[in-house]
Image (cartoon, rainbow, N blue to C red):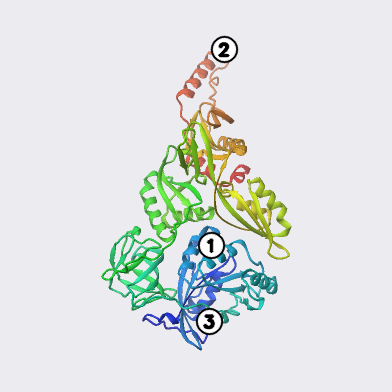
Amino acid sequence: MSPRALTPLQPAATPPAQIRNFCIIAHIDHGKSTLADRMLQITGVVADRDMRAQYLDRMDIERERGITIKSQAVRMPWQTDAGTFALNMIDTPGHVDFTYEVSRSLAACEGAILLVDAAQGIEAQTLANLYLALENDLQIIPVLNKIDLPAADPEKYAAELANLIGGKPEDVLRVSGKTGMGVESLLDLIVEKIPAPVGDADAPARAMIFDSVYDAYRGVVTYVRMVDGKLEPRERIQMMSSKAAHDLLEIGVSSPEPVPTKGLGVGEVGYLITGVKDVRQSKVGDTITNHRKPASEALAGYTDPKPMVFSGIYPIDGSDYAELREALDKLKLSDASLQYEPETSVALGFGFRCGFLGLLHLEIITERLAREFGLDLITTAPSVTYEVMTDTGETVTVTNPSEYPDGRVAEVSEPVVKVGILLPKDYVGTVMELCQSRRGTLLGMDYLSEDRVELRYNMPLGEIVFDFFDHLKSKTQGYASLDYEPAGSQTADLVKVDILLQGEKVDAFSSIVHREKAYGYGTMMTERLRKLIPRQQFEVPIQAAIGARIIARENIRAIRKDVLAKCYGGDITRKRKLLEKQKEGKKRMKMVGRVEVPQQAFIAALSGDVEGKDKK
């Protein structure tokens, strides 16, 4: 703890001139959470005995994986020659799938610390977050972290940073989140460089909801940034979009544990508790105002994020459907980018079609549903949204292969993304090869420094969502970083591949793929199901088909009972008679028998690790 830290936080509202709102933006694993830990310690808001690594990462998944999933707001006091300041910091995620969390955090700030690892340099997500911050007109403070590492090269990367945002390399601050070196200078620079928030203290209260979480005991906890006016405990507030009115039971700041205050004024960031249990009543981006003297105009809010990847989530036990709905409602509160709607599947029963911002987002949501709510789930293979035009001129939006229209299709449009890949120059050839194999078209190539290259591609989103990132990492020994953003759509030669069990379609295994890759998908899926489905009393054909044309086939051989076991010696005609009788029975069974696919087979067949499962 620094001697310039102030342990007590003023319970009354702080004047706007003494407030600084900022966030930390960086690529994944560049030390945001570690730097936030040092700031908490130096400003004295967390005692040394309570300190733990990644203090602001509250979820078990975050701590295990070493990544930030949820933005966390915290208020810290800091003393300088100009007086005492309240620093409101938001620690943001670094992965591309959580960009929406970052964009909401940026809207609640006036400045951003652009953090770059002094051993790795600028990466794709660093650039993406920087452009987001510049769009929001934030004051950028460039900082090099991890300068205590033996592999650090601060001079080289300071020049790279200065070149990127303009300025001189010596203006780039050098800190170590681990040792605390340079962090006090950074706090001084935040006070000096980042502008104070601006707002009308006498106007009707307007507060922007930028986050919310569900507490089992206290209901919905809403995190807000005050823009105009003031909110005080016990007053009645109103949500401007839904017109719902509530009594304000508690108001305060996160420091980093909740500290109740006498109110929030212009520019302050804090939390509100109204005791409401209905999770749909606190919408991220909504404006809160005073019920008695409401504001006439709501704040601009946030644009709703567009899901990039769709997947079906089904409970293994059908009776868990209501619990799954409730769990998704509560998760939606803490993750506004999650979208879902009910759907049914012949094979899997009742479930939800969910939209995610990427594969990691899908993985984290399913893991949180399993851990936090104790649900056993099946997720279907990820897919994207397609626009299908039939011969009659009708356009159908397809988020699930089962929605693909039967009959003749005139054209299919698929979503396209603009991909930015940052990598060392030695791997350019292999990465170009990978992108071309995924139908990518090269837009450009820039050298950021002597040995770092940025490749820009237009690629179909459907080619990225499955395993592109894994292949990219393995081909570049983990050095490449990826970022993507929507770039419209294009028409492509896409077909729907159906999987048939004994002539019946199993909708859960259907997929929309490029015609060139249809045969590969068909053979892989039929072979895999042959290994997973148990043998029946009769032979079961597994077929992959495009429309009425079969493109791949595997057979599950019948279990054959030895009907001749009781025959020892005797005439051959008796044996033949028994075999003929068995043959007739098998034929009848094949006509009336149904193939039950066990749940384990569904889970294994729909899991992303195609090669790994088959190798075993």
Q: Is residue 386 left or right of residue 210?
A: right
In the orientation shown, which residue stands out farthest toward the bottom? 81
Q: Is residue 556 visible?
A: no
Q: Which mark is residue 570?
A: 2
| 3 or 2: tag closer to the N-terminus | 3
On the image, the x and y values in percent for residue 547 come to 53, 31
On the image, the x and y values in percent for residue 347 come to 45, 38
Q: Is residue 437 left or right of residue 241?
A: right
| 1 or 2: tag closer to the N-terminus | 1
- Spatial CA span between label 3 and label 2: 105 Å
Image: 204 above or below 213 = below
Badge 2 marks a residue whose secondary structure is loop
Q: Which mark is residue 192?
A: 3
Q: Which mark is residue 64?
A: 1
On the image, the x and y values in percent for residue 65 come to 55, 61
| Residue at 55% in and 19% down | 564
